[in-house]
Image (cartoon, helix red, strand yellow):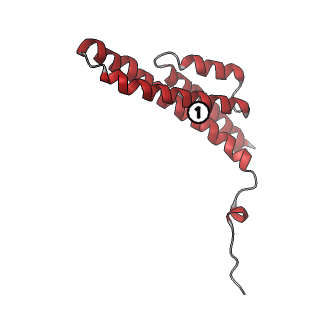
């Protein structure tokens, strides 16, 4: 009996879109945590180093990193909203929280609660 060679398409799950959406909201949860942490680093570490210790390099390094992470988080948020994984209202709250130090930590917790509810609904089915 000849050995059958399986291709990637033979072994790939048939419901890729169903699996992709939860991964996207998990990605958003992680991004809110990382972006929020970078804002905290900018406001509580880099800015005081610039003004109190005369080290503008701190803001020159941390500022662009935070800006990039912020844009990445917003793109992820918009993608998550476009796929219906988060409501526009909750998405607006996540965006506003990203503008406030420690708001990203709140958003991370908010999104993680939704993920936990989603998982509980899957296991109950």
Q: Position of residue 7 (x, y in %)?
A: 69, 67
Q: Residue at x 66, y 28 (%)?
A: 78
Quadrant placement of the C terminus: top right
Q: In the figure, is residue 25 to the left or right of 56?
A: right
* Above or below: residue 116 compared with residue 8: above
Residue sitting at the far left: 53
Asked if one can make out residue 37 in the rendered structure from this viewpoint, the answer is no
Q: Residue at x 31, y 23 (%)?
A: 57
Q: How many marks?
A: 1
Front residue of 45 and 56: 56
Q: Position of residue 56 (x, y in %)?
A: 30, 19
Residue sitting at the far top: 51
Circle 1 residues within 10 Å: few <14, some 14–19, many ≥20? many
Please tell me in which quadrant of the rendered image residue 21 appears: top right
Please tell me in which quadrant of the rendered image residue 107 appears: top right
Residue sitting at the far bottom: 1
Q: Which residue is mark 1?
A: 28
Quadrant placement of the N terminus: bottom right
* Above or below: residue 123 compared with residue 51: below
Q: Position of residue 39 (x, y in %)?
A: 44, 22
Q: Position of residue 112 (x, y in %)?
A: 58, 32
Asked if one can make out residue 94 in the rendered structure from this viewpoint, the answer is yes
Front residue of 28 and 112: 28
Please tell me in which quadrant of the rendered image residue 123 appears: top right
Q: Secondary structure at mark 1?
A: helix
Q: Residue at x 69, y 71 (%)?
A: 6
Front residue of 33 and 47: 47
* Above or below: residue 37 compared with residue 13: above
Q: Residue at x 73, y 46 (%)?
A: 17
């Amino acid at each position: 009996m000849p050995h059958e060679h399986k291709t990637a398409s033979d072994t790939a799950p048939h419901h890729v879109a169903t699996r992709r959406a939860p991964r996207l909201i998990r990605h958003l949860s992680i991004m809110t945590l990382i972006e929020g942490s970078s804002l905290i680093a900018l406001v509580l570490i880099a800015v005081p180093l610039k003004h109190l210790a005369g080290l503008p390099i701190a803001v020159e390094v941390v500022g662009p990193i935070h800006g990039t992470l912020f844009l990445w988080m917003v793109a992820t948020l918009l993608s998550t909203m476009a796929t219906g994984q988060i409501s526009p209202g909750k998405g607006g709250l996540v965006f506003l929280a990203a503008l406030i130090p420690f708001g990203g930590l709140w958003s991370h917790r908010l999104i993680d609660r939704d993920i936990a509810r989603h998982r509980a609904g899957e296991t109950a089915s």
